[in-house]
Amino acid sequence: MSGVSSAEYIKHHLVNMTYGKLPAGYARVDSHGESQTLEQATWTLAHNPEEASAMGFNALHLDTLGWSVVTGLIFCTLFYRMAKKASSDVPHGMLNFVEMVVDFVDTTVKDIFHYRNSLIAPMALTIFVWVFLMNLMDLVPVDWLPGLAGKIAGNEHLYFKVVPTTDVNITLGMAFTVFGLMIFFSIKEKGVMGFVKELTLHPFNAPKWYVNILLVPINLILETVSLIAKPISLGLRLFGNLYAGEMIFILIAIMFGAGWALGLFAGVLQWAWAVFHVLVITLQAFVFMVLTVVYMAMAHDVEEEH
Amino acid sequence: MNINATLIGQSITFFIFVWFCLKFIWPPIRNAMAEREEKIAHGLQSADRAEHDLELAREKVLRQLHDAKHEAAAIIEQANKRSAQIVDEAKEQAREEGDRLKVAAQAEIEQEVNRAREKLRNQVATLAVAGAEKILQSSIDVNIHSELVDKLAAEL
């Protein structure tokens, strides 16, 4: 971090390793300040935030998506090994822990979701453990993994974000998947007409049909907004919490380079914030899981009494 | 902060992990837990039953012990009675035996007395004859008076 200003340091930590398609005619500026115009659209790694922006939607965040897959695989491997070991005999060691988590998720789901759907509980377990593991990456000191990746790649300025949930694409990706499932189950349980009725005849409803016709547009607007707000708030809540936490870790990390006294203070701060953050990451994983289950329960709810 | 294809990538990844969990993780763990729950419930139930059985057995033992004590007491009583009876019988027998012996002894004594009396009687006759002979020797001729003496002896 020597010779890098604080602003540059922070900015560097907030850029993803982006692999995407640069459009034809884009003028690439290399490290020497020389401009080079691309003759045709090219798939490449972005060298700076501007290039990442220019790629638009045709880009993948290799770092966050990679770590999301890695943490997901850790979850699957661990739980699959324990699932193979599980029997009605006395459980030992790790199996105890895994069963405790499974039981916790099962109880939570049963409290909220009163319908028969074998997908909900496994999905809740996946979300809880996976999101927790993704959040847990936040507790790895901010420079360790990027530094290591930079060494391996031989590029000190490699962009590398290790916490998947600080990438809005990851959280919204999950939230919109949940949203998709929600609409799917809504239509499956109530039929297309039931779903449309739910959007148009709530919350205002009149006994006379000609009044209802006037109310339909108002209802549609209200219901659509509240429907769309669900995945957005779900995704952004997780993203916001983790992004803020990550930001504070980055700010503390800057202090390490400012003399031994401030460095020591930064060490204490980092420890304190990490302890606090353990609560945040667990709580956010839990909230994401509970809200998913709640949305699924809402999709199954048939409200005929209105 | 760009929205890009990572969104779709994460969505696909999410589906794959949820499917994996639904297929290979959730069912075996839940089944094992449910099975264990049942096993524990069974265990507790049989423990209750065993406790109940133990209680019953304890009651039975107490009852049997009680009965045995009663029986033993009865046997002892009976034995005591029997021993008293035996002693009584023995006493009776002894007394009878004593009486019998006494009677036999008396009979023998009487017999002996009689025999002695007979002997004495014989001797008295002889002595009387001898005495009389001595007295009469001088005056009486044996040949003359032997008939008389024999007659006398026969009278004895």
Image (cartoon, grey):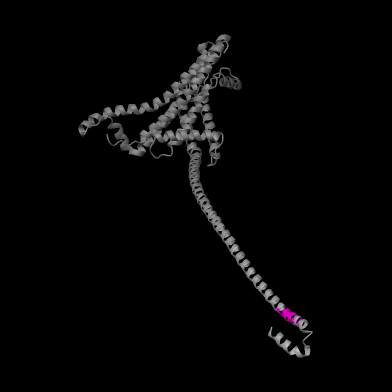
Q: Position of residue A46 (x, y in %)?
A: 52, 21
Q: Nearer the viewer, residue A37 or A226?
A: A226
Q: Residue at x 60, y 62 (%)?
A: B91
Q: Is residue B108 visible?
A: yes
Q: Position of residue A290 (x, y in %)?
A: 42, 30
Residue reaching furthest to the right: B138
Q: Position of residue A278 (x, y in %)?
A: 50, 23
Q: Position of residue A87 (x, y in %)?
A: 54, 41
The answer to which image quadrant residue B130 occupies is bottom right
The answer to which image quadrant residue B89 occupies is bottom right
- Examine the structure image and report whether residue B124 is included in the region drawn in magenta: yes
- Examine the structure image and report whether residue A162 is included in the region drawn in magenta: no
Quarter of the picture holding the C terminus of chain B: bottom right
Q: Is residue A207 left or right of residue B78?
A: left
- In this picture, which residue range is highlighted in magenta? B121-130
Asked if A179 appears above or below B113 in the picture, the reply is above
